[in-house]
Amino acid sequence: MWMVLLHVLLVSGFTLRILLREDLAPDARMAWFMVIALFPLLGCAVYFLFGEVDIGHRVSRRYQQVYTTLHQAAAAAPGQEFLGQPHNVARLISPAYQAPFHYLASVNQLYPVAGNRAELMADADSARARLVADIDAATEQVNVLYYIWLNDHTGNHVAEALMRAARRGVVCRAMVDGLGSHALLKTPLWQQMRAAGVQTAVALPIRPLLRTLLTSRIDLRNHRKITVIDGKITYCGSQNCADAAFAVKAKYAPWVDIMLRLQGPVVTQTQLLFASDWMMATQQGLAQFALPTEAYADGFPAQVMGDGPTERSRVTPQLLVTLINSARQRLTISTPYFVPDATVLEALCAAAWRGVAVTLIFPQRNDSWVVAAASRSHYRRLLQAGVRIFEFKGGLLHAKTLTVDDTLTFIGSTNLDLRSFDLNYENNVLLQDAATTAAVHARQQDYIAAATAVTLAEVEAWSYGRRIWHNVLATVGPVL
């Protein structure tokens, strides 16, 4: 009798909590209802561990303090034009594309800044070689943050470059996510960096594990990939500090990434983003960071985006919808993980229906079979709207890119899935530049050349069993 009563109280309590949450989308609410209805005790346990997007009250307060301190100090810094001004949107951005820049400014209170340059790296090896060369040329500071840092060829080369820089007096900071790079933290390499003078820190540590499970969520992660050198050079894109062979998931290799090397005021905006994570982990202040502003007369306008569970909810899907709605002729997106919410899915279909050439590029073989199946549940609707879908065959396409017409590029660490939308700390750059957009779009065309087109006839020929499987997983997509 007592067990039955406890069962009823437990299920009723979690059901009531789900009903009371105003931040939960209807599809996510229904998904949680289904999980708890089908697997009551297991569902309650899973919701307790993974249902709330809550990083913990103490950590949330600390983030707000850091955010306030950071902006106050940056606003008072000499030459603080790197923050941008509200009028910059109208002054720098073409009228047809101002909406996403206006929206992005509401997230971090950073505005588009002119005078930036970008160079698209040829491939992963070229990007890492150039980054190491930039570290070797550094004279003041090097700050790096990676979600995944492996003890492989790339990981060792970057670590060795940081140690060389530290030994010659350059201030070097290395930060990794506590879960994504947990293996590195146990290796001698991490200790060697410390011994050489590299300052190290862990973002969102998972230990003590019990406290993390009870007060937060273990899957709230820092997914950012940030490198800032002397406050003058930054790299933005999808590449972790790891070889393309990606030893931890070698059977899906090579990981195909994309990286931009950026210079200009947008570098300082990225420095502020890194500083916020570093201040959270170490209690150091902004005064420890170089904030130079170097603008180029022939440079383009760009703006940094930093998102995470301590920002307001639904920021990323709302920005993506704004970007999609700004497309007039062409919209091309590559992402390894495609589990969109209803607003993004509807925006993609609407863009295609109004005549925009919408193209989506996904990996044919995904390291997450759940995500792959959930993604394919949307194929039929997208294809019926006129969206072109390609599945890349040359490894795991990990590049997260979005180009609008011949004008805008959105690039960084964000995937088109609910983890990036709700759970991860991400970093991206939104820029307006025809040359850079043409280069990124050409890279997207390279992906298409190594891909297979998915046709509506092919999808309609899928068996009932396969379609049911895809749709079942898509139904619980909001809790993935």
Image (cartoon, rainbow, N blue to C red):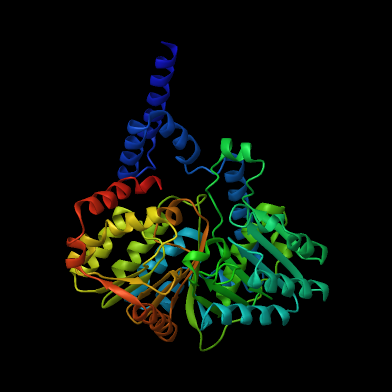
Question: Can you say which quadrant of the picture contains the N terminus?
Answer: top left
Front residue of this view, candidates 256 and 76: 256
Q: Return the residue nearer the eye: 234 or 240.
A: 240
Which residue is located at x 17 percent, y 61 percent?
460
Say which quarter of the image contains residue 226.
Answer: bottom right
Q: Nearer the viewer, residue 457 or 381?
A: 457
Q: Quadrant of residue 401?
A: bottom left
At 72% from the left and 58% from the top, the residue drawn is: 187
Q: How many circles with numbers are drawn on the protein?
A: 0
For residue 418, say whether it is visible: yes
| Of residues 431 and 341, the one drawn nearer to the viewer in this rendering | 341
x then y, percent, for residue 382: 23, 63
- Is 153 on the left-hand or right-hand side of 396? right
Residue 395 lies, with reference to residue 37, above or below; the image says below
- Give the x, y percent position of residue 221: 55, 52
Q: Residue at x 37, y 39 (%)?
A: 22
Q: Is residue 436 left or right of residue 291?
A: left
Q: Is residue 248 above or below residue 156?
A: above
